[in-house]
Amino acid sequence: MIKGMQRKYIVHKIEDVESYLSATQRAQIGVIGATIDSRRIEEGKAPASNNSYIVINTDESYAAEIVEILKRHGHWG
């Protein structure tokens, strides 16, 4: 893990989910997502499923550059 990085999200590669989880487990992920969305809506927030993210693996050669960009914009640590 890169120094100063906070773990805020759970990310699983779709290919891994499709390859390694049973149909029941994949359905459970859907139920979890739907539950989170409905609770967020109850709190007056947008559903999490409305969000889209860019994911960078920390072992990529350009990861340090991305960290510097995030720091400049106040989105690091």
Image (cartoon, rainbow, N blue to C red):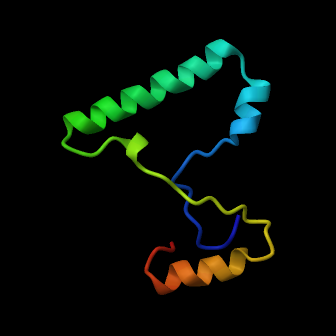
Taking the image as shown, residue 19 lies to the left or right of residue 36, namely right
- Res 19 → quadrant: top right
Q: Residue drawn at (46%, 74%), measured in percent from left and top?
A: 75
> Is the residue 72 above or below the residue 55 in the image?
below
The image quadrant that residue 29 belongs to is top right
Q: Position of residue 22 (x, y in %)?
A: 71, 16
Instruction: Tell whether 63 sits left or right of 45.
Output: right
Q: Residue at x 61, y 78 (%)?
A: 67
In the rendered image, residue 41, in percent from the top left (x then y), is placed at 24, 36
Above/below status of 44 relative to 54: above
Q: Is 48 placed above or below 3 here?
A: above
Residue 22 position (above or below residue 39): above
Q: Is residue 29 left or right of residue 65?
A: left
Question: Where in the figure is residue 37, as x and y percent of width and height?
Answer: 35, 34
Give the total of numbered labels. Answer: 0
Q: Please give the name of the residue rendered at 38% of the width and 33% of the height, measured from the top-left corner.
A: 36
* In the image, farthest residue toward the top: 24
Q: Residue at x 71, y 64 (%)?
A: 1
**Residue 24 position within the rendered picture, expressed as x and y whole percent measured from the top left:** 63, 12
